[in-house]
Image (cartoon, rainbow, N blue to C red):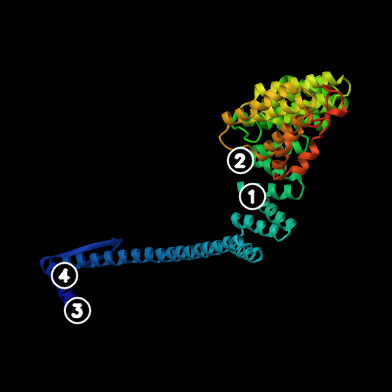
Amino acid sequence: MLKQFNRFIILGLIVAVAVYVTITNSAPATIHLGGTSTITATAGVLYLAIFALGCLFTSLIALLWGVKAYFRERKLRNQVRTHCDFVETLVSGVGLMAIHEWGQAKDRWEDILASDPTNTLARIELSRCLEKLGDNSEALRVIDSARAQGAATIGILMRGYELNKTQGNLVGAKDNLVLLAQKHPSQHVLISLRELHLALRGYKEALQIQDKLESLGFRDSQEENPRAAIALRQINEELSETHRDQALGELIKRHSNYYPALLLSASRAVKRGDTTVAVENYIRAAKISKRNEDWKSAVSVWLNNEHVQPQQRFEGAIGVAKTACKSQSGLGRIEAELLLIEVLLAANHFHEVDSLIEKFSRLVAKTISTPLPEGIQERFLVCKGLYLVQTGKAPQSGPLWHELAHQKNIISCRSTYQIEDPSNGQKGSPSPLLSTP
């Protein structure tokens, strides 16, 4: 009721203003419309007519803008609704993939592509579902069609690389990575491209990629010396046996601390009977890696060398073991000392073994605060027991063998070492112990 009353008041005010304008402007006025057309009336009436026409024109303009705004708002609402449907379908697809429902997830991505064929994310995820369903060729076709339509995004190219590599098409995988490296030369992309070039034996191209990696400041966490690794791979795959040793020697001269090349050169030297080169490279490799297995390999080269006298063999092996003791620290030093004890036992240098066994326990207590690893403890007990047996103190070794009986690898340990009665051989002659340390 109050609202209607307010409306009557406003209407009355408008009429009052109109009457006031008409009365106060009662003089005649003429408007020339052009040519001979004119309109003559009181000035107040003309003023009111012009005002009414202005209001009508403004209302029409406002109506036009309103209609346009309505359709624009309707379009935006449809877009928002479509986007919400897309997000809902996307979340559903991702969730189904997370629980390995590949078939249902595939349907979700196909629904998205049906409404938006240019959606690259849906194409990528659809290809993943197809791959999991075992249809690799169709998965690759989805990615290739996206590339053909000009959607060569980072995700599409990376997916193309993965699928081609899975199917063994290294050339196709390389093509995708080449384009990707031009768009986004990340460390992962460049390293993957370098490895593909190597797989295709494109060593020159692999070195060019390595140059680009270094120019961009990237560092390979998996390989300390990529250039040496590329050269070593080329040696192994392209050179004949007759030229391989020479190339390895040249590679080691350029990259003296490259561990894999040193190991390969040492193993090849063992096969051709070059003890000096084999031992030298094993020692250099051991100093780089700090691994006692490399020291053992150097010792084995001497012990298994049948081209020299036994005394020279044992002297060489003892020299390597002593070098290992000087080079190692911590637990590595303990293993090196144990290796020296084993070599001295094999050479029947019992007077040196006696002092080393006494020092060994003190070295362990001084070096580490935790118990010795089981394998090292077993080796020490065996060495100590063999020392007692071979020096005529076999009864004293009984507690050691009982302790060994409780160790896991007693059978393998007993088979590694040969107990020899010293009464059957000449005192001081080399024993066959540790033929393979």
Q: Is residue 47 visible?
A: yes
Q: Is residue 116 visible?
A: no
Determine the image quadrant of residue 303: top right
Q: Which mark is residue 4?
A: 3
Instruction: Determine whether the residue tagged by mark 3 lies in a helix, strand or loop.
Output: helix
Quick one: label 1 or label 4, which is nearer the N terminus? 4
Instruction: Determine whether the residue tagged by mark 4 lies in a helix, strand or loop.
Output: helix
Determine the image quadrant of residue 377: top right
Quick one: label 2 or label 3, which is nearer the N terminus? 3
Asked if residue 112 is positioned above or below residue 362 in the image, the reply reads: below
Label 2 to label 3, Cα distance in Å? 70 Å
Asked if residue 120 is positioned above or below residue 294 in the image, the reply reads: below
Return the residue at label 2: 183
Residue type, mark 4 in image: Ala
Label 1 to label 4, Cα distance in Å? 72 Å
Residue 234 locus on image (x, y percent) = 78, 30
Q: Residues within 10 Å of mark 3 (few under 14, many from 20)?
A: few
Q: Which mark is residue 199?
A: none
Residue type, mark 1 in image: Ile
Return the residue at label 4: 18
Return the residue at label 1: 156
- Labels 1 and 4 touching (C-beta < 8 A): no
Quick one: label 2 or label 1, which is nearer the N terminus? 1
- Seen at 83% across and 23% down, the residue is 427
Label 3 to label 4, Cα distance in Å? 21 Å
Instruction: Give 385 or 139, whichever is nearer the viewer.
Output: 385
Determine the image quadrant of residue 361: top right
